[in-house]
Image (cartoon, rainbow, N blue to C red):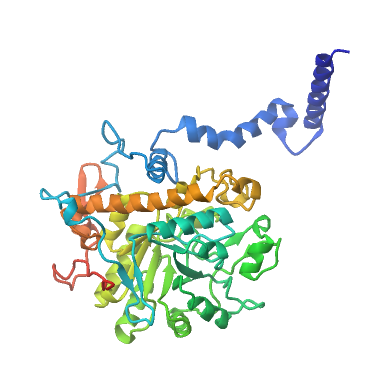
Amino acid sequence: MPTWLIVSLAVVVVLGLLALQDVLQTGHAIRRVYPLLGRLRYLVEMIGPELRHYIVTSDLDERPFSRSQRAWVYQAAKQVDTSIGFGTQVDTWRPGSFHFLPSPFATLHEEAPDAGEPVLIGAHRPRPFPVRSRINIAPMSFGALSAAAVRALAAGAAGAHCYINTGEGGLSPHHLSGGSDIVFQIGPAKYGVRTPDGAMDWDALARIGLLDQVRAIEVKAGQGAKPGKGGILPAAKVTDEIAAIRGIPAGKPSLQPNRFAEYHDVPSLIDFVERIKSVVPVPVGLKIVVGDESLVDALARERAETGRGPDYLSVDGSEGGTGAAPPSLTDHMGLPMRDAIVAADNAYRRHGVRDQIALIAADRVTNGADAALAIALGADLVNIARGFLLSLGCIQALKCHTNECPTGVATQSQWRQRGLVLTEKRERVANYAHAVQDDLMTVVRSVGLRSPSELNRKHLEIIVEVGRRISAARLYPYPEQLTESEGLPTPLPIAS
């Protein structure tokens, strides 16, 4: 019997068996009524995101990042020209869009070649932290990210003179491998500094705080993408290595509590922060999602009255991303970055201690204009997460929570991680960090300023409806008791 006939019969038999299975099964109505053809529905559903991703949608339609935004990151990371031709594709009258007010006397490049001196966090701590870059790598845990991704980010951060935040998954050798400045984050599960019963291991924390590369400790009170819910790491991602770093069993889901048991109100939160400060010499910060603005007001009042509290606030907008979170929180919980950073900035101004705190903004930032917006509204520094993932080669496949990330960024699959070559990706991370910083300075010089710290809300206008724009200083007014001159940003101390 000819080979082609054998193959044809085999195909017919397989298709016949699949059709019989479709007719007899009771779980899927489409397959039961339309055997074989019904299976195409699931195929189309499976590849639907890719079809929309590359073919159907326009350059500006996709979320969370449009093709246009992703293209800018890819080009910047590869040091390809990021210029566009024929004018903007953005609807400049779309409510919520913003534009800066250019000066007729733009600052010459040689007058402001870079962002200036470092911003000093925790000036009165035994080991203050001079942050050398306005653009830094936001918290992303080893576990959620692959070892290859963390190593590339850490090495890229060193090349760009920015810091990398460990995220709540603990401090790994991969974070240390790059030689960059590190911010060590503690989540409610206290990964990396926990006792077997989940309590704080203060001795372990003290040892981490003494490491030269660890420049600050951050308490994660909330995250923009999932405020009020602890981190989730599926069992498939909890390898032996990750389990050892976190201090948890391997092969089981890693579920964090939705808040620290150590505090239940602002006074006990302040006490917790102060105890950490008594154990480590570095600055201690607090990562929050703003809801009721009374929180930031209480933190500012405490700083003004007693000098106690965090040395910096990392303010996460509700636009923030994560590997896994319920839509009810991702879509509907917490203030967006613009409102949140203004609330924090105004609170510390109102109490006269804005120069004693650093504010770090994080949301859907990709380029210098996004960073300039955050700084003009009140931030001192900007954290970027997903932009750096894109610089590694992330294609926004939206499979971060499945352990099947096709690019090797958010998976523990050794096969998929092969795509992340350290020598190549670390350069792209550093290139992207430099590009955003340079882009930020392009905005600063266009407005006629010399430093990002000079940006304020008067340099910015926001579209509130078609045909109506308003100064950000009117939309987000500075505290009333401040005079016009006092209402401008007060730079943090500059590192010597």
Asked where in the image residue 305 lies, by quadrant, the reply is: bottom left
Asked where in the image residue 355 lies, by quadrant, the reply is: bottom left
Q: Is residue 348 above or below residue 430?
A: below
Looking at this view, is 143 or 361 the one in front?
A: 143
Please indicate whether residue 7 sits to the left or right of residue 445 in the image: right
Image point (39%, 66%), residue name = 314
Residue 373: x %, y % from top left = 29, 55
Q: Is residue 81 above or below residue 120?
A: above
Looking at this view, is 272 or 301 the one in front?
A: 272
Residue 21: x %, y % from top left = 81, 31
Determine if residue 422 is in view.
yes
Looking at this view, is 434 or 121 the one in front?
A: 434
Q: Is residue 9 above or below residue 447?
A: above
Please indicate whether residue 141 sits to the left or right of residue 250 in the image: left
Determine if residue 146 is in view.
no
Residue 397: x %, y % from top left = 54, 43
Q: Looking at the figure, which quarter contains the C terminus?
A: bottom left
Image point (33%, 68%), residue name = 344
Looking at this view, is 104 or 466 the one in front?
A: 104
